[in-house]
Structures are given as C-alpha cells and as structure tokens.
C-alpha cells in the first residue's frame, strides 16, 4: 500500500487531507508521486492523519525523484549538484577517517612505510584555506555553490593525510575536523540530513583523536541541530549536555561554551522549559564579556550578534507571542538584517513573524512576512529558509481556507522542488 492508497482507505480526498494538514492540495499530490518528501515538521501530522507510525509512514512514501533529474536525466557522478546524494564525498570522509586513525595509532616509522613521502601541503595551508572557505560560505547567497570547492579541499586533505611523513598528523586532524563541519553545514542547508549527520559525526571522531575539545564540542552542537530539525529535542539536549562538558575542557577564551548555551536554549524551548531556556540564553549573553577574538570566523563564529533573533525565535516556540513579536521586530531593524544583507538570517526572522500571525489567526501578517521570506529563499536557494517556511505551513490550520494563505502555501511547497 502506498500513500495514496492509505489516504483513500481512510476516505480522504487530497483536498481534505491537505486541509487537515494546513498545506495545498498540490503538495499532497507531490508527496504521493514522490516528487517531494514531507518536511520533518509535516511528517508527524501526516502520520497522525493517516493513523500510522512514523516508521510505517516511511514505508508508504514513494522514493523521491528530483525534479531536475526528471527534466534532464541523471547528472554525472563526477559533478554532482549541491542537493544530490553524493557517494563520493561519503567515501572520501570514510577514507580520511581511516587513514587519519591509522597514522595517529602507528609509530612514525611504520606510518612512513605506508606512504610515498610526497607532501601535498602544510597544515597551516589547510587551516588558511579552511578559514577562507568559511568566509565564502558565510557570504554566499547560495550555500550549495561552495560544495564543489569543499569536496576538492577534502580530496587534497586526504592526500596530505596519506603522505604525512613528518609527524604532523595532529594539525592535519584539526584541519579535517574543521572541514568536515563545513561540509556538514553545506549538506544541512541543502536538506541532506543524513550527509550532514555523517559529516558532524566524523568531525567529532577526528576531533577526539586530535584532542581538540572545542572542535569536538562544536561538532556535537551542529549534530544537535539535525535532531532539532526533526523535533527530537530530547536527543538534542543529550548531545548538547555532552558538548557543554567538552567545552568546559576547552579554551576558556573561546566562545564555545556560550554557543552551546544558546543552542541549549532552543532544545529547552522545544521541550517547553521556559526557565531552562531563559537561563541558557542568559549564559549565552555572557559571550559579550569575552575579547573580540573569541571566535575564529570558521567553525566557531558565535559572538552574540544573533541573540536577539534567537531569543525571539525561542519565545515563538514557547508560545510567548507578545514577547516574541517585540524581540523579533527589534531584531529586524539591525543593520546586518537589513534588506539585501543576510538572506538566511532575515528569512528566518520573517518566517518566525509569519508564524506569530498564524498562531493569532491573522492572515494579513502571515502573507506579509511569509511572502518576503519566500523571495529570500528563492534568491538564495537556501534549504534552511525553505525548512522554516515548511514549518510555517504546519501552523496554518483554519487559515488554510483563506485563498491568500493557500496561495502562499503553494509557493512554499514549490521551494522543495528547486
């Protein structure tokens, strides 16, 4: 039995099921044809409506087919797109991990016997290149455009690890852990949760081998975001508790422990713990007491400048709508969130303000903020903003009957096919 058959068995038309879930009818049709998959916030509602478990829902869903592949055929595996599953990069990840583990475990003379003695780059070269890639990633409107460069850097780093004959494996491991986290960020933005989780897990493993506690903690924080994107807040809280302990063993001059606290606030909000959320946010605010060089511009970028929008988003999660709207409206006035600046951050704030309108059953507010967020998602090809908008659709409820909101939902559904 497939998704359509299960729907018909329960007596639902596509229109009725769409109304129950607060989505457009065409979205249900795309789920049933396999053109798109339900986003994590929609899966629980869909499973409930169809009276199945999440595992049973997975069995009902057809294999998704990328719209681009339908139109142009399968892309060459030598040049995969940013949103396509990429087995090559996974193999590179595993190969680097295997080689790096062997090089750190073997005595130097044995490690030299396994290599050809050719140096492909000094550790400092990789550190500088990684720092540059993080800057490119941060400034890029389309995060997927960084993907080919990251893959090439991974391949080069793999060669360096395999030919490390001078005992420089620890700095190279640091560089590998750094790069794995960036690769995970690119995958996460493209909705490739499995690839992102694999990248962060490898970053954590390599960081452990290198004894790099701050890198290790940051890898766990990023892995927690994967859990939270699928509303597994308890699992995320467990990871973040470990990250907090690791950060406590790291460099006290870095902002790692404050970033951990800021992400813990999101997990606590997801669990409905207002006191825990505000306590964590207060801890995160103390980052302002550190020196300006408490971030490195790469795998650790937390400097507190996003705390206003993050606090507002947490209040939305907790249902404190007046506090949320006031905080988010003020955050939107910041220069860094002005129109034409950070598409990703501005889009997320707009999606939260639209969500407040949905909770208040105010279609004008939903459409006003939601439409600009869609434009930013389209301009940046950001899967992150698209995910936030997909979550917005689950808040529509009775508003889905308003033609303006229904049109907005249809436009949001189209973001998943781009």
Image (spheres, grey):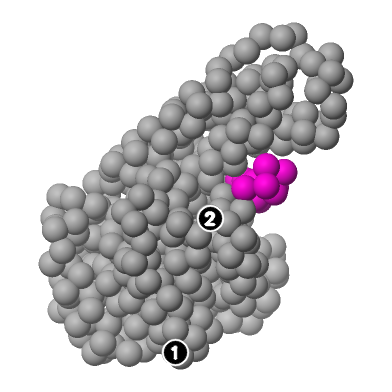
Q: Is residue 274 left or right of residue 327?
A: right
Query: Which of the 4 image quadrants contains residue 318?
Result: bottom left
Q: Position of residue 152 (x, y in %)?
A: 52, 24
Quadrant of the image containing the N terminus: bottom right
Query: Is 107 rendered above or below residue 206?
Result: above
Q: Which mark is residue 251?
A: 2
Residue 163: tell me if it is visible. Answer: yes
Where is 255 relative to 42, above or below? above
| Foreground residue among 299 and 369 | 299
Find the distance from the CA under tag 2 to the CA under tag 1. Answer: 29 Å
Q: Residue at x 84, y 14 (%)?
A: 113
Residue on which the image places disc 1: 274
Q: State the image coordinates of residue 391 (x, y, percent, origin top left).
A: 40, 70
Q: Is residue 417 left or right of residue 273?
A: left
Residue range in magenta is 197-212
Question: For residue 108, what is the image quadrant?
Answer: top right
Specify the quadrant of the image occupied by residue 350.
Answer: bottom left
Whether 106 is drawn above or below 402: the answer is: above
Q: Nearer the viewer, mark 2 or mark 1?
A: 2
Residue 211 lies in the magenta stretch: yes
Instruction: Give SS at disc 1.
Output: helix
Prevailing SS of the magenta stretch:
helix
């Amino acid at each position: 039995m497939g998704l359509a058959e299960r729907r018909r068995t329960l007596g639902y038309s596509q229109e009725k099921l769409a109304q129950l879930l607060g989505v457009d009818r065409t979205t249900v049709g795309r789920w049933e044809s396999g053109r798109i998959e339900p986003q994590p916030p929609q899966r629980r509602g869909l499973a409930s409506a169809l009276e199945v478990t999440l595992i049973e829902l997975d069995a009902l869903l057809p294999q998704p087919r990328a719209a681009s592949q339908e139109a142009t055929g399968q892309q060459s595996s030598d040049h995969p797109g940013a949103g396509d599953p990429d087995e090559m990069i996974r193999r590179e990840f595993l190969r680097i991990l295997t080689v790096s583990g062997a090089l750190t475990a073997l005595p130097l003379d044995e490690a030299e016997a396994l290599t050809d003695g050719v140096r492909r780059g000094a550790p400092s070269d990789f550190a500088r290149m990684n720092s540059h890639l993080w800057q490119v990633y941060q400034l890029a409107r389309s995060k997927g455009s960084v993907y080919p460069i990251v893959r090439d850097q991974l391949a080069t780093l793999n060669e360096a690890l395999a030919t490390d004959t001078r005992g420089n494996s620890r700095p190279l491991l640091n560089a590998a852990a750094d790069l794995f986290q960036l690769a995970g960020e690119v995958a996460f933005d493209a909705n490739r949760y499995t690839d992102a989780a694999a990248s962060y897990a490898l970053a954590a493993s390599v960081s452990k081998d290198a004894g790099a506690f701050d890198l290790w903690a940051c890898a766990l924080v990023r892995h927690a975001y994967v859990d939270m994107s699928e509303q597994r807040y308890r699992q995320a809280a467990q990871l973040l508790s470990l990250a907090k302990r690791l950060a406590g063993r790291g460099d006290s001059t870095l902002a790692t422990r404050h970033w951990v606290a800021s992400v813990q606030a999101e997990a606590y909000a997801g669990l409905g713990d207002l006191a825990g959320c505000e306590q964590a946010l207060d801890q995160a605010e103390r980052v302002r007491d550190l020196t300006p060089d408490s971030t490195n511009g790469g795998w650790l970028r937390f400097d507190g400048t996003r705390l206003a929008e993050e606090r507002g988003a947490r209040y939305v999660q907790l249902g404190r709508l007046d506090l949320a709207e006031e905080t988010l409206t003020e955050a939107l006035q910041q220069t860094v969130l002005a129109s034409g600046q950070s598409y990703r951050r501005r889009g997320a704030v707009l999606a939260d303000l639209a969500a407040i309108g949905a909770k208040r059953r105010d279609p004008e507010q939903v459409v006003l903020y939601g439409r600009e967020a869609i434009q930013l998602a389209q301009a940046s090809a950001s899967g992150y903003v698209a995910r936030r908008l997909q979550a917005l659709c689950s808040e529509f409820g009775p508003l889905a009957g308003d033609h303006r909101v229904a049109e907005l939902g249809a436009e949001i559904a189209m973001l998943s096919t781009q």
